[in-house]
Image (cartoon, grey):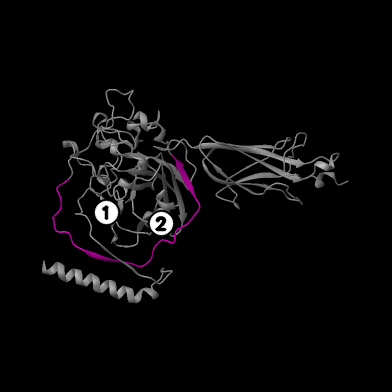
Amino acid sequence: MLMRIHFGRLIVLIALGMTALACILPGDATGQVIVVTATPDSGGAGGLETAQGAPTPSQTPPADAPTFTPTFTVAHLITPPGTTGTTRYITDPETRDYAPQKKSPSGSDNFAGNRFERPYTAETMEYLADVDLKRVELKIAAPWVYITFEFSSARAEGVGKTVYGAEFDTDKDGRGDFLVWGISPSGADWTTLGVEVWQDGNNDVGGVNPQLSNPMDPNADGYDQKLFADGQGADPDLAWIRQVEGGKKVQLALKYSALGNAPQFLWNGLADAGIRRSDWFDYNDHFTAAEAGSPFPTQADLYPVKALSGVDNTCRDAFGFTPTGSEPGLCMYYGTISGTLFRDGTCDNLAAWNNGVLDPGEPGSDAGQIRLGQGACPSSGYKSASPGADGKFLFADIPIGTYCVSHEYAGWIEYTTAHPVTVNLAAGESEVVHIGIAVEMFCIE
């Protein structure tokens, strides 16, 4: 006990010393040291403490750590500045309208394929609105990665219990390499309390066949290396969480360096108020289908949800590369961008010149190239297309995301419509962009 008391004093002295030096430390934009006193959990091997009732024998967690719970002080040197905008996003089926029927939308849950749409309590099928994900956004704003979770509606009981997280597959083999997650916070201020960052050190997340259900391996330990928890770790500022928009959303911030600044990766989001065990990933490898249950009444031999409850995860999105389509767990997230390059008016109808609208009878133009760039305008270099004689162009079956549509022409030109145009493409969507050219350039004798 005496050694622990001396250690606690040492931490406080270190924190005070870091406070004095904060104004000269690199990377501290504000010169402010934020000191947070926290009482961590017992530190069991499984990560966040299970929120459900007594587990079945196959779910039995490891024995509790010693009951002594130290109080420690974390000195934070920098908090995330926050950001707006989206680099990538994933939409997820919403279960709210099906909650009165105590079921999930058809096709939204696939236990064998590691897709869970189970915002319900076990057995009783009580709806958990804050577990019902609608959209998860990813924003890279180096040195930070932001993940924003939008769910059906806030739920007071979920604060301090529901966990929001993201998996990152940096080698793109279908199995997660890193997991960041945090317990739903009570306010809008950034906090590290309840936030954890894990790594799979022995490459066993996902089992023999990543994403697919495998027989339970008693030696598998999922995400087994805890890199950060409650501000403890090599970097006390590695990951943070906060409420946004008055609790309508939750946002995580993770230092990009935790992922090795990987230029390419697969990622997905999750909400978990039921299992919350980093060492049980993938969950469909830890439970049998009978143990897990089902959210579909038509599966009478499995319904309702049982041990695998209170969980909603998304499909996987590709960041920084164009997927082949064969990546395990990949979202079916393609859409189409098309349009017409047109002469805005005709030389014999001057009254209709340059109104910025593709009117009947206005001819298309095949002048120049249509460019498509990834990200908001200005951006180019992803794809290009030559408009036909009728001015029409098409970019078919492209991944969802944000694109910039622009026209490139070697000579003088004036546009009568917005140009370039930023397009946010959703799954299965067809976006139309018409580009108008001032008709004067065609009527000069």
Above or below residue 149? Residue 240 is below
Give residue 44's mark: none
- Res 290 → quadrant: top left
Q: Nearer the viewer, residue 91 or 46?
A: 91
Instruction: Please state the horizontal and vertical placement of residue 57, each as a whole percent of the image.
Output: 16, 36
Q: Quadrant of the N terminus?
A: bottom left
- Res 173 → quadrant: top left
> In the image as oriented, which residue stretches furthest toward the right?
445
Q: Amino acid at mark 1?
A: Lys
Whether the residues at callouts 2 and 1 have beta carbons within 8 Å, the answer is: no
**Residue 8 in sight here:** yes
Distance (Cα) linking label 2 and label 1: 17 Å
- Res 9 → quadrant: bottom left
Q: Residue at horizontal 33%, vertical 49%?
A: 179
Instruction: Please state the horizontal and vertical placement of residue 217, each as a whole percent of the image.
Output: 22, 37
> In the image as oriented, which residue stretches furthest toward the left?
1
The residue under label 2 is 256
Please rate how many residues cluster around mark 2, counting C-alpha atoms within 10 Å: few if below 14, some from 14 to 19, many from 20.
some
**Left or right of 250: which side holds 74?**
left
Instruction: Please state the horizontal and vertical placement of residue 294, each as a whole percent of the image.
Output: 30, 29
Secondary structure beneath dot 2 equals helix
| Residue bounds of the magenta highlight | 62-91
The residue under label 1 is 226
Above or below residue 396? Residue 401 is below
